[in-house]
Amino acid sequence: MDSWGSTDAEIRHILRPIEELFEQEFPDFQPYPWGARRWIHGHVRHVMLAEAMVGDFAKAFEGVTPDEAERLADSFALGQCGVRGNLAGILRDASNTTEVTL
């Protein structure tokens, strides 16, 4: 539901009318730093819709022991991450450094 794990393609039918309403009724509403669209997504996607799914998300972890939960959390450790070469190159070029290390 939130932008960390998906696009808004499946909920455009919800977001589009709200975005259009804000464009029509509040054309000068551009909250800092990313504007109205990001503000709307923050409230609608990341709070209203995502919060409503917390129970479903919790069910995915039913029966997980503390040790299993720790192993799951460890899978997100920096040492487990892979370098996205194209992105690292773009960031390196933009920052004028010669090496990206983790």
Image (spheres, rainbow, N blue to C red):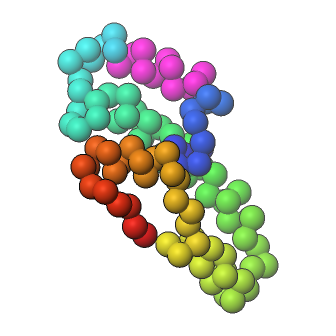
Instruction: Report the predominant secondary structure element of the magenta stretch.
Output: helix
User: Residue placed farthest to the right in the image?
Assistant: 63
Name the foreground residue: 18 vs 80. 80
Which residue is rendered at x = 61% and y = 58% of the image?
A: 54
Residue at (34% x, 51% y) in the render: 92
Residue furthest front in the image: 98
The single residue placed furthest to the bottom in the displayed view is: 67
Q: Is residue 11 left or right of residue 68?
A: left
Closest to the observer, 80 or 26: 80
The magenta span reads 12-22
> Is 52 on the left-hand or right-hand side of 59?
left
Does 38 lie within the magenta span? no
Residue 30 picture quarter? top left
Q: Position of residue 64 (x, y in %)?
A: 75, 79
Q: Where is 84 relative to 22, above or below?
A: below
Q: Position of residue 69 (x, y in %)?
A: 66, 80
Residue 37 figure quarter: top left
Above-or-below relation of 14 to 65:
above
